[in-house]
Image (cartoon, grey):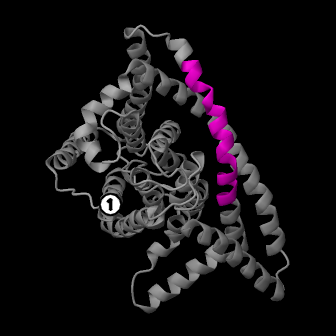
């Protein structure tokens, strides 16, 4: 329901701003808004179409994992933690393995690999959902962890910074990790309060300690490398994770003596159908965002906030990166475009450039994820999922501002 109101509000506010500008003599805004509807519709369609190949590949790979029993073994290994965060999921259910792989891919910044795994997890969660049009607690917990996802190695952010000419493209590594940890912790706590899940459990505490140990080990390795060595290490680690996952699934099927090729084909057939199902949801979100942006409403909001901050006597340097923060929950491509605009206008090594990078990577696109993941399984009632996702987003934004001032001001 909240997404419905926000969707209508984006259209209404954009149209209102456009009409006001027309009355004031600006005859260009309304045509720009009209053009944005066609542009964003095309972008949404092409985005889904471009996702088809990735969906086909990873749904086929996941099918091998199902048939070979690898997913069940993963679920058994992780069940002490996952069954406490997802008490509705039966022990050993394939959804637990898909959830783990999706979260792991997000932690390493592997967006293309994470999305099909997430969609597969949603399909598995829907299979045990009693109310097929209503989000279950497990779905909401899963999407909260997705939208607030911890990013250990922000590969894409570092690549954009390097392309923009940053002196040290990797200098956002530690601030981004700390920021995303804050957003994930807040999202997990808020969702746990709604679902009355006790986080002070020894298995969950062990999980947090393990993550902390892994992060510390990663720091030890990376901080002993120069910039070029660090980028090479991140690329190699990313490649090893993706290719290693594929080979593990294939060899698990071969070891269990199943027909790996036929299993892959059977699973891959659903890739195109899932991509087509996503088109209306993606187009709906992108068109609304495009109209609001083309109207100039987002720029007006930024100027209003800057004025208010300065009247309070506070430093308003962060306001230049605010459009990235406001756009991120709505549209990943839109936020990415604004980050690149800030690189061009302020420079990638400026305070705004650093903050934009951290805001782009500290959380995920909440409304896009809700629309796509829920839309893929026909969920219409989101319950409190928007509140959990936005809580994580807000925590990420606040943490990004303070951490950026600490590191880069």
Residue 400 picture quarter? bottom left
Dot 1, crowdedness within 10 Å: few (<14), some or many (≥20)?
A: some
Residue 191 inside the magenta-drawn segment:
no
Q: Which residue is mark 1?
A: 195
The quarter of the picture where the N terminus appears is bottom right
Is 351 situated left or right of 290 in this image? left
Q: Which residue, as the protein is rendered here, is positioned at the far top?
A: 257
The quarter of the picture where the C terminus appears is bottom left
Please name the residue shown 56% across and 77% down the image.
302
x, y percentage for residue 298? 62, 74
Please name the residue shown 28% across and 43% down the image.
83
Is 336 situated left or right of 193 in this image? right
Q: Can the viewer see residue 231?
A: no
Please name the residue shown 69% across and 47% down the image.
279
Please name the residue shown 40% across and 33% down the image.
94
Q: Nearer the viewer, residue 211 or 121?
A: 121
Q: Nearer the viewer, residue 76 or 400?
A: 76
Is the magenta region chiefly helix, strand or loop? helix
Span highlighted in magenta in the image: 264-286
x, y percentage for residue 305? 51, 82
Residue 278 inside the magenta-drawn segment:
yes
Q: Which residue, as the protein is rendered here, is positioned at the far bottom?
A: 311
x, y percentage for residue 223? 26, 43
x, y percentage for residue 126? 49, 44
Secondary structure under the numbered disc 1 in the rendered image = helix
């Amino acid at each position: 329901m909240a997404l419905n109101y926000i969707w209508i509000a984006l259209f209404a506010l954009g149209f209102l701003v456009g009409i006001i500008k027309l009355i004031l003599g600006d005859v260009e805004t309304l045509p720009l808004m009209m053009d944005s509807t066609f542009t964003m519709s095309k972008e949404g369609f092409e985005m889904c179409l471009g996702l088809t190949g990735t969906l086909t590949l990873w749904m086929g790979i996941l099918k091998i994992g199902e048939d070979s029993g690898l997913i069940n073994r993963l679920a058994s290994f992780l069940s002490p933690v996952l069954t406490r965060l997802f008490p509705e999921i039966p022990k050993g259910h394939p959804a637990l393995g898909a959830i783990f792989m999706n979260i792991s891919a997000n932690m390493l910044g592997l967006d293309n690999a994470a999305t099909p795994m997430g969609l597969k997890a949603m399909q598995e969660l829907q299979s045990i959902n009693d109310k097929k049009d209503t989000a279950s607690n497990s779905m909401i917990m899963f999407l909260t962890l997705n939208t607030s996802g911890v990013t250990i190695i922000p590969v894409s952010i570092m690549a954009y910074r390097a392309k923009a000419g940053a002196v040290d493209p990797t200098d956002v590594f530690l601030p981004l990790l700390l920021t995303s940890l804050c957003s994930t912790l807040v999202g997990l706590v808020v969702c746990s309060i709604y679902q009355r899940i006790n986080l002070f459990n020894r298995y969950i505490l062990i999980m947090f300690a393990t993550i902390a140990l892994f992060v510390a080990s990663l720091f030890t390795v990376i901080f002993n490398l120069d910039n070029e060595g660090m980028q090479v290490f991140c690329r190699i680690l990313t490649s090893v994770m993706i290719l290693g996952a594929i080979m593990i699934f294939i060899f698990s099927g071969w070891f269990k003596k199943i027909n790996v090729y036929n299993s892959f084909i059977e699973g891959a057939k659903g890739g195109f159908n899932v991509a087509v199902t996503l088109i209306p949801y993606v187009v709906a979100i992108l068109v609304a965002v495009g109209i609001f942006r083309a109207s100039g409403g987002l720029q007006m909001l930024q100027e209003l906030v800057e004025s208010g901050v300065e009247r309070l006597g506070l430093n308003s340097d962060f306001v230049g990166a605010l459009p990235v923060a406001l756009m991120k929950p709505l549209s990943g491509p839109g936020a990415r475009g604004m980050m690149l605009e800030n690189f061009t206008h302020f420079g990638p090594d400026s305070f705004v450039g650093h903050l934009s990078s951290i805001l782009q990577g500290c959380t995920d696109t909440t409304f896009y994820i809700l629309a796509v993941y829920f839309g893929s399984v026909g969920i219409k009632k989101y319950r409190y999922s928007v509140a959990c996702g936005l809580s994580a987003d807000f925590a990420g934004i606040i943490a990004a501002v303070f951490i950026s001032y600490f590191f880069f001001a």
